[in-house]
Amino acid sequence: MNYLWEAMLRAKEQKMETDRLRFAMAERFSGYMELANPCLNQQDLTELPSVEVNLYYRFYHIFKDLCGPEEREFPQLTGGLINLIIHQLAENDVLSGMTRKEYYKELLYQDIKEGMFGTEVLEEIGLFGREGRETILSGLLRQYETGSSLDIFKDMAEDLIDESIVYRSNDNFKEILVFVGQKEGEEIRKKMDLLIRLFVELPYHVEIYYERHFGIMGVDCTMELDEMTLC
């Protein structure tokens, strides 16, 4: 992490309330970096008593009179003011980097966290990391803009679930077949449940095959007896 906005996003990723972050003026810092973490590749913010910042990297004009070497009176008051000001600057950093699409995604995620999509969705979306969650929110926005589409479900499944392939049944146009080249387990099952819940509308039905591919006529590699499953 090198910048304030990275610290704010990392805190949210680690399910840490940003109010718990305490920013402070770094005693020792590089002139080429904004954050002065104990470790160059610091990842876990919960281990730090405070996030030390090089206030002069971008905000010299704000802090030059507050953090000068001669300003030694009222250290607790000064520290509190620095923390409050940096929090506001960091929030501004995050917001200024957001496009309209990202803003809508943030609103969508807020609705999910407040349970407006149901408790199952709230639980299951937590199984994905930040990048996966962003992909899901982008898919929801795309769905709102274009209407429900099996193409969106196909994109979501193949982007988010390793070794997955989505097929439309030739025998029943309402049936979707999904191959997942992983062992079936609770986590992968819940991830698939989430994608089906969000991106597959009635009257479509999804059938999932784990580990073993179902046989496809004319595709020899799927027709090996010991390696295939029957639909």
Image (cartoon, rainbow, N blue to C red):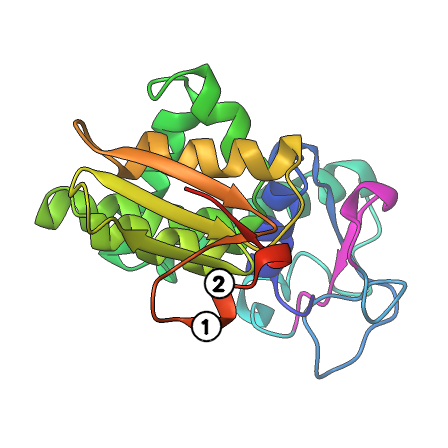
Q: Which mark is residue 223?
A: 2
Most distant residue in the bottom direction: 32
Q: Which mark is residue 111?
A: none
Residue toward you, 77 or 190: 190
Horizontal side of residue 130 vs 216, given as left or right: right
Q: Residue at x 45, y 31 (%)?
A: 193
Residue toward you, 50 or 108: 108
Badge 2 density bin: few <14, some 14–19, many ≥20, Cα 10 Å: some
Q: Secondary structure at mark 1?
A: helix
Choose top left, top right, bottom left or bottom right for residue 202: top left
Q: Residue at x 47, y 38 (%)?
A: 192
Residue 12 lies, in percent from the top left, at 59, 42
Q: Residue at x 72, y 68 (%)?
A: 54
Pointer 1 residue? 220
- Compared to residue 60, the image places residue 168 above or below, namely above
Query: Marks 1 and 2, how far apart in space?
Result: 5 Å
Horizontal side of residue 15 vs 89, given as left or right: right
Span of residues in magenta: 43-56
CB contact under 8 Å: marks 1 and 2: yes
Badge 1 density bin: few <14, some 14–19, many ≥20, Cα 10 Å: few
Choose top left, top right, bottom left or bottom right for residue 96: bottom left
Q: Which image quarter is the N terminus in?
A: bottom right
- Compared to residue 23, the image places residue 52 above or below, namely below
User: What amino acid does circle 2 point to?
Assistant: Met
User: What amino acid does circle 1 point to?
Assistant: Asp
Residue 127 lies, in percent from the top left, at 59, 37
Q: How many marks?
A: 2
Residue 141 lies, in percent from the top left, at 23, 47
- Is residue 114 on the magenta stretch? no
